[in-house]
Amino acid sequence: MSDSTVTVHGAHAEHEHPPYQRHHFHSMEQQVDTTSFAMWLFLLTEIMFFGGLFTAYLIFRNWYYPAFVVASHQLSIKEGTANTAVLIVSSFTMAMGVWSAEMRRKGALVLCLCLTFVLGLVFLGIKYDEYHEKWEKHHVPSFHYSTKSFTDPASDPEIHKSYPDDKALPLDMARHTEVYFGLYFAMTGMHALHMIIGISILAFMIFRARAGAYTTGHVTFVNNFGLYWHFVDIVWIFLYPLLYLISRHS
Amino acid sequence: MSTQHDPHDQHHGTGHDHDPNEQDVHDTLNHIVSPVVYITVGTILLVMTAVTAAVSFVDLGVFNAVVALAIACFKASIVVLFFMHVKYSSKLTKLTVFSGLFTFGVLIMLTLSDYFTRAWGRW
């Protein structure tokens, strides 16, 4: 018992290191490498998680192709593109936040984190508007789900005007549009949950950054949160073409 | 893209000997990517988003999906390389990212080739 105490004291005396270096790491370099390796391992599990959803989407799209094509015509390309742009700009502001932390510029860091926070909220706001429209049209999978837009396209004049070539589906195929919307809500919903978690962590980081926590040389937290935020951006980069774009001309 | 190198680069590989008087101890540990790179990458991402949205309004048959996914892969690649610093990271990080994507590729390819070929010869 006393031996280990002696060792720790000895280590302190002969081995100066920054206060944020944990004692079980040999050097700061090792600590930084280890934490970023751990973050990447976590992101790999996230890739597998979203990968399962993407695979399910591709399989069902292949099986119920006509239903998936007309169901995807319900999405607004305008809102999807706007959200893609918002997320890309938020990734840029987050990257600038990491740079500000590295350069020890507290004001710039707080500004970048606030901008990322606001852009995240804008994304969720646009997403809410899209969800709300699906709710009003009874396109949320549930007992209230309605296939009317697909069995009788003329009953949905707004979409019918944009896609006049869409033919009415027989009822059995029209039922499968519910699978499309089920996957749409599962995928964008899990993505939105990641956004909400990210925004919550951002709020915490803004408080900590204002107190100067990340601008004293210890940037690991900002760095690893940046990796998370960019990962969430990448998920959307794939959701956007798969859900909104690829079925426009099918 | 030569602007991505910054003065801190010279510290790389010089070892980290925890000199208590050294103020910038942590700055030598991460490659600091210049804002010029971030602005360039961000602009390319926004331009590619506009391109992929515009292309979806042109009828290319099956190539609509191919082009849209190719652009998405390109966008994801530059996010990983520059925003996520993989281009400037250790071999361990590069290997981790690559092995994860490779494993995911194997899983999705085998699963899809199973499902997409089940009906072959049945019509």
Image (spheres, coloured by chain):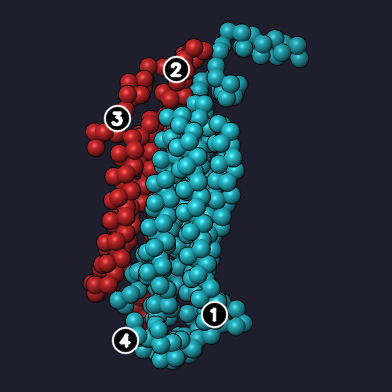
Q: A90 above or below A223?
A: below
The chain painted cyan is: A
Q: Give the SS element for disc 4.
A: loop
> Which residue has dot 2 on it?
B16
**Whether labels 4 and 1 share one chain:** yes
Q: Chain of mark 1?
A: A
Residue highlighted by disc 1: A136
Asked if residue B45 shows in the view, the reply is: yes
Gap in Å between the C-alphas at discs 4 and 3?
Answer: 54 Å
Report the disc number at residue A205.
Answer: none
Chain letter for the red part: B
- Element under label 2? loop
The numbered disc on residue A165 is 4
A113 above or below A146?
A: above
- Residue B5, labelled with which disc? 3
Q: Chain of mark 2?
A: B
Indicate the amino acid at tag 1: Glu
Q: Residue at x 44, y 91 (%)?
A: A155
Q: Amino acid at mark 2?
A: His
Q: CA distance from mark 3 to mark 2?
A: 20 Å
Q: Nearer the viewer, mark 4 or mark 1?
A: 1
**Secondary structure of the residue carrying numbered label 1:** helix
Quadrant for the C terminus of chain B in the image:
bottom left
